[in-house]
Every structure is written in C-alpha cells, then in structure tokens.
Image (cartoon, rainbow, N blue to C red):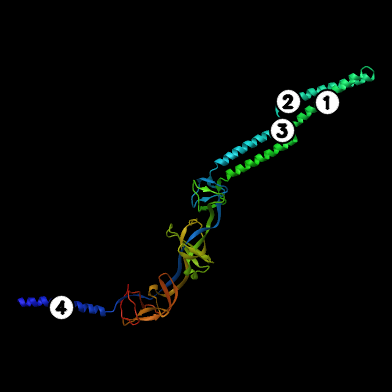
C-alpha cells in the first residue's frame, strides 16, 4: 500500500505537466480571435467638424477722442444700447475746470463790451455829460456876448478891445465843448469796441473747446446695437484713438470658421453649415458657406483657412465674440454601403479590407471608396451588403489566415 502511494505521488505531477503542455500546444495551433463588422447600408453624411467665432455683420468701433483715465463703465458685454448712449466716462476734472475758467473770461468780456456799447462807465458818462452841458451854456453865452458887442462896435458903442476879448472867450468856450465831445466819444471808441468783440470771440471759442473736452469724456455709442469686445475697465488710462468697445447689429451675423488645412479641399461655397454653442445645449443655427479661404494662416498650433458663413440670428442669442462649434455638410450618400474606417488597410498602394470567407479564413480585397464621415466610409465597389470585414488586431493579418471571428 505504501508503494502505491509513492507511485501516485510521482505520477500525478507528471500527468499535470503533460496536460498543461498539451493545452498550450492546442492554444498555439488554434486560430486567433479577430473582431469583425458587417457591411451595412445607411445614409452617410460627410461633415467637416471645426470651431469658429461669431462676428456682427455690421459694426462700428468706439474709440477714445482724448486721453484720460476711465472713471466709469456703464455697460456690459452683450448689452443692447441706443445710439448716443454713454458706454463709459473719462475723468473730466481738468476739463471742467478749464470750462469754468473759460466761461468766467467770456462773462468778463461780455460785460466790458456791453459797457462800451452803453458809452463807457456810468459815473464817467455822467460827469462828462454835466460838464458838456455846462460848456454848451457857456458857449451860447459867449456867442451872444460876442454878437452883441460886434453890433455895438458898428455903432461906435463898443471898443475893438471889448470885441476881441468877447471873441477870445467864444473861442475858448467852443474849444471846451469840442474837447468834452471828444472825451465822450472816446468812452465808446469803435476801435475799442472792435477789440472787445474780438476778445469776446476768443472767449467763446475757448468755452466751446472746453465744452468739447468735457463732452469727449463721455464715450457714446455711435449707433444702436449690441456692445461687445469691451476693452476698458475703471482705472485704465486711454490715449486718443484707443479702442473702447465695438457696437454691432446682430440680427444677422457672420461666422468665421477655422478649417484645418487638410480639410479645406472638402469645403465649397453654398454648403450647409450647422452651428451649436455650448452655452445653449440643443440649440442649432443653420447657415451656408459664403466665402472660402484665400490664404492659410497660423492659429495657435494649427494651420487653418478662414471660412465665412452667414446666418440669421433674430433672437440675438449668438453674441459677438462667442466661440461656437460648426459642422459643414460636405457630402452625403443615401443607401450607401459602409464599413468602419478602422477596417480599411493599405497594401501595395491599394486600399482594401480583409473579408471573412465561409471557410473561416480572411481574404484581401481591394475596395473603391466614396463619401466618408468621421467613423465610417462608403464602399463604391469591392464589397457586398452583409459581408464581414476584419477590424484592427494586435497582429498583422495576411491573405488566407485562419481566424476565429468575434462580432460585437
């Protein structure tokens, strides 16, 4: 009995090893498992998937008309504004001080001109008026005395000396009147008035300039529309000509699509475009390609052509500057025979697939392709509906290889 047990202890491991070796040999000789997919008919749509940005079809830029620090910003991105509405304000403290000083100088000049037009200062006018009236009376008296003495002299009733003295007094009185009249006229000299009018025009021009500088501190919308690309914030310093924001009409918008260079050959004018925006899931906008690229430009790490698409945006949901997703419908095929794109292989300069035969082996078969989507390709020739084509495997397949097919 003890000998039997010893024999079993020796034989049992050998049997186990033999079974394991036989299983391994069987596995090595068994055909490999290969995933397959059936050729099927479907409507295949070839699309160019890309991204882009929304731009208003019509827009105007708002720029600073003078330098200054931004004091207030009254609008936000996407806000609808009326023409002339204030978007932002510059600090106008200095401009308002200039305006107050200019208005003061204008008032002083206006008062001086009004004084000249009234004939000069009131006290001076009154003094000269009184002296002139007195001198006029003295002139009249001297004239009467002279005339009376002249008549008497003709009758030998007055001497020549008396007549000469009367004439001297008459001339003195006349000179006195003329002197006062010149003084009265000098109070409102035309040259002085012209000079005062010139100073008034200068003062009014200074007021208008100061008012303009104050008004230029209000950055207004040049047209009605939606505000976007706001480039300022309170505390920022602007120079004349610096961009503040843009205002555009968004009932109809332009979409600038960035199509990668290898895909540009699939895009043509008139192709339908579907636009989506991550911020509004499920919402779609339809448009068409209006303009194809004239050059290829660098966009980050990409080489792209800019494709222009127009579409209606009646609700104004697509805001200027929005980053959108786009699908350009390049081609479509109804009732097309299709295979997964990963089933396609290239051998000897030909594109083809490995087809599963009834004997469990694969056969290389060249195919002619048509429309392709992101995941599937149309087969124009070389396959029939329902045939099974091999999908990629970790090892290289060859024509005539035996396989164990696996269908998902």
Establish if 385 lies above or below 67. below
Question: What kind of element bears circle 1?
Answer: helix
> Residue sitting at 38 percent across and 73 percent down?
342
Residue at the spot of label 3: 116
Reading the chain from its start, which is encountered first: label 2 or label 3? Answer: 3
Cα distance, mark 1 to mark 2? Answer: 20 Å
What secondary structure is found at the residue carrying circle 3? helix
Q: CA distance from mark 1 to mark 3?
A: 27 Å
In whole angstroms, how far apart are the C-alphas of marks 4 and 2?
Answer: 149 Å
| Picture coordinates of residue 234, whole percent (x, y) | 49, 46
Looking at the image, the residue that sits furthest to the front is 161
Where the C terminus falls, by quadrant? bottom left
The residue to which callout 4 is attached is 15
Residue farthest toward the top in the current orientation of the protein? 157
- The tag earlier along the polypeptide, 1 or 3, is 3
What is the CA distance from the residue labelled 3 to the residue labelled 4?
138 Å
**Which disc number belongs to residue 174?**
1
Give coordinates of residue 90: x percent, y percent. 53, 45
Q: Which mark is residue 126?
A: 2
Residue at 25 percent across and 78 percent down: it is 27
Label 4 sits on a secondary structure element that is helix
Disc 1 and disc 2 in contact, CB within 8 angstroms: no
Q: Residues within 10 Å of mark 3 (few under 14, many from 20)?
A: some
Determine the secondary structure under disc 2.
Answer: helix
The image shows residue 204 at horizontal and vertical percentages of: 65, 40
């Amino acid at each position: 009995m003890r000998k039997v047990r010893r024999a079993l202890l020796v034989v049992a491991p050998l049997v186990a090893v033999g079974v394991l070796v036989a299983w391994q040999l069987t596995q090595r000789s068994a055909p490999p498992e290969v995933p397959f997919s059936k050729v099927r008919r479907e409507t295949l749509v070839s699309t160019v998937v890309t991204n882009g940005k929304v731009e208003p079809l019509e827009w105007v830029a708002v720029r600073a008309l003078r330098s200054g620090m931004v004091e207030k910003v009254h609008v936000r991105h996407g806000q609808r504004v009326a023409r002339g509405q204030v978007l932002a304000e510059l600090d106008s403290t200095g401009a308002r001080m200039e305006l107050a000083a200019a208005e003061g100088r204008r008032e002083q000049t206006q008062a001086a001109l009004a004084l000249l037009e009234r004939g000069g200062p009131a006290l001076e006018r009154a003094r000269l008026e009184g002296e002139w009236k007195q001198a006029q009376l003295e002139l009249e008296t001297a004239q009467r005395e002279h005339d009376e003495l002249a008549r008497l002299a003709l009758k030998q009733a007055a001497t020549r000396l008396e007549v000469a003295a009367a004439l001297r007094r008459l001339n003195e009185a006349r000179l006195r009147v003329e002197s006062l009249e010149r003084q009265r006229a000098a109070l409102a000299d035309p040259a002085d008035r012209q000079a005062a009018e010139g100073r008034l025009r200068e003062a009014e021009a200074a007021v208008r300039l100061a008012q303009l500088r104050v008004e230029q501190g209000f950055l207004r919308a040049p047209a009605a529309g939606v505000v976007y690309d706001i480039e300022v914030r309170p505390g920022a310093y602007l120079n004349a000509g610096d961009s503040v924001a843009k205002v555009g009409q968004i009932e109809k918008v332009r979409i600038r699509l960035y199509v990668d260079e290898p895909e540009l050959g699939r895009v043509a004018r008139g192709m339908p475009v579907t636009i989506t925006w991550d911020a509004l899931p499920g919402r779609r906008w339809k448009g068409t390609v209006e303009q194809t690229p004239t050059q290829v430009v660098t966009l980050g790490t990409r080489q792209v052509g800019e494709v222009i698409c127009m579409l209606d945006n009646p609700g104004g949901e697509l805001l200027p500057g929005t980053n959108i997703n786009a699908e350009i419908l390049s081609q479509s095929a109804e009732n097309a025979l299709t295979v997964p794109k990963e089933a396609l292989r290239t051998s000897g300069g030909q594109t083809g697939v490995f087809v599963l035969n009834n004997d469990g082996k694969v056969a290389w078969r060249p195919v002619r392709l048509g429309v392709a989507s992101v995941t599937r390709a149309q087969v124009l020739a070389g396959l029939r509906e329902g045939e099974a084509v091999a999908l990629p495997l970790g090892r290289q397949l060859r024509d005539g290889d035996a396989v164990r097919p696996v269908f998902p």
